[in-house]
Image (cartoon, rainbow, N blue to C red):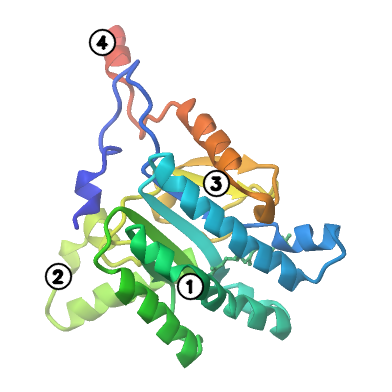
């Protein structure tokens, strides 16, 4: 699918035009550890509560006219956490897909896990492959789970793949445009995110969707991820609707006024 070409975000909007709903929302699911700490619980229970919040969000998103949801489940930097916590985080996709794959399949959700497979156990890779295969025919809603993902790593991997194509005679260095490069990224099949949400009060991207975030609106919310639900998503969409997206251009009326 040439998602980039179809996406309505191409081109500057007209002044006064109604703000379109964000088609693609991305979320940094942050605050599991603090949520657990506040309750005197181990961090692992915060992550498990985070899986429940993910289920609520996946259920709410299509009702709010969102078509793509990309969530950050494990970053390439998360390997530096204590081994016990890494093991807990590695168990989350299994927990999520075992409990929800039937519903995802039935409700038309296509699952895609983006990020490096290297470093993941054979069992986990099989769980991911199965979830993707079982939902590959769906097209009502698209769920990208970023797992062992880093924006810089993905850009480096994309550059390596292009260099390999050049070395093999399949491409010329002069072929490389932004659109062509985007096709080498893990998110090649998705439009760029319109809105990136980060709960938990932190205000940074933390290596999430660095290339794709070029024109995303950022919304930061003071709620810890395990408490996240439909009302928080609605509030983020309201904040998004109030934004003036110009994509580096000026709106048509202002061009006339300046002329
Ligand atoms: C960051 O919070 C969160 C993570 C590293 C894990 C995110 C995973 C989930 C929400 C579960 C769903 C995941 C999948 C793959 C199905 P943190 O631990 O850094 O929280 P803190 O900043 O409060 O310590």
> What SS does tag 2 mark?
loop
> Where on the picture, by quarter, is residue 155?
bottom left
Residue occupied by mark 1: 97
Q: CA distance from mark 1 to mark 3?
A: 23 Å
Question: How would you rate the neighbour count of disc 1 (Cα within 10 Å): few for under 14, some for 14-19, many for 20 or more?
Answer: some
* Residue 136: image location, x then y, percent: 27, 69
> What SS does tag 3 mark?
strand
| Quadrant field for ligand 1 | bottom right
* Residue 225: image location, x then y, percent: 65, 54
Q: How many marks?
A: 4
* Residue 48: image location, x then y, percent: 66, 68
Q: Is mark 1 within 8 Å of ligand 1?
A: yes
Q: CA distance from mark 4 to mark 2?
A: 41 Å
Looking at the image, is mark 2 or mark 3 nearer the viewer?
A: 3
Q: Is there CB contact under 8 Å for labels 4 and 2? A: no
Query: Please, is residue 50 above or below residue 61 in the view?
Result: below
Residue occupied by mark 2: 172
Q: Is mark 3 within 8 Å of ligand 1?
A: no
Query: Furthest-bottom residue in view?
Result: 122
> Where on the picture, by quarter, is residue 173?
bottom left
Looking at the image, is mark 4 or mark 1 nearer the viewer?
A: 1
- The structure residue drawn at horizontal position 53% and vertical position 36%, both measured from the top left corner, is 234
Lower sequence index among marks 2 and 3 = 2
Q: Is there CB contact under 8 Å for labels 1 and 2? A: no
Lower sequence index among marks 1 and 2 = 1
Q: Is residue 33 left or right of residue 153?
A: right
Q: CA distance from mark 1 to mark 2?
A: 41 Å
Residue occupied by mark 3: 197
Residue occupied by mark 4: 256
């Amino acid at each position: 699918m040439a998602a980039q070409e179809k996406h309505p975000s191409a081109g500057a909007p007209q002044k006064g035009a109604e703000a379109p709903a964000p088609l693609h929302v991305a979320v940094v699911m942050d605050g599991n550890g603090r949520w657990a700490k506040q309750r005197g619980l181990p961090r692992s229970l915060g992550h498990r509560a985070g899986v429940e919040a993910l289920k609520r969000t996946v259920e709410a998103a299509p009702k709010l006219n969102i078509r793509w949801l990309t969530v950050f489940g494990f970053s390439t930097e998360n390997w530096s956490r204590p081994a016990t916590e890494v093991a807990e985080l590695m168990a989350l996709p299994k927990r999520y897909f075992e409990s929800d794959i039937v519903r995802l399949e039935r409700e038309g959700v296509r699952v895609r896990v983006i990020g490096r497979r290297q470093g993941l156990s054979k069992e986990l890779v099989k769980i991911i492959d199965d979830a993707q295969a079982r939902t590959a025919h769906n097209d009502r809603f698209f769920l990208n789970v970023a797992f062992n993902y880093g924006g810089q790593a993905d850009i480096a991997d994309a550059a390596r793949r292009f260099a390999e194509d050049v070395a093999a005679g399949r491409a010329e260095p002069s072929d490389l445009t932004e659109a062509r490069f985007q096709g080498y990224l893990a998110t090649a099949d998705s439009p760029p995110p319109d809105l990136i949400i980060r709960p938990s009060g932190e205000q940074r991207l933390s290596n999430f969707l660095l290339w794709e975030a070029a024109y995303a609106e950022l919304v930061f919310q003071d709620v810890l991820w395990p408490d996240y639900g439909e009302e928080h998503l609605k509030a983020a969409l309201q904040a998004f609707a109030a934004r003036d997206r110009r994509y580096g251009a000026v709106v048509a009326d202002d061009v006339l006024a300046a002329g």
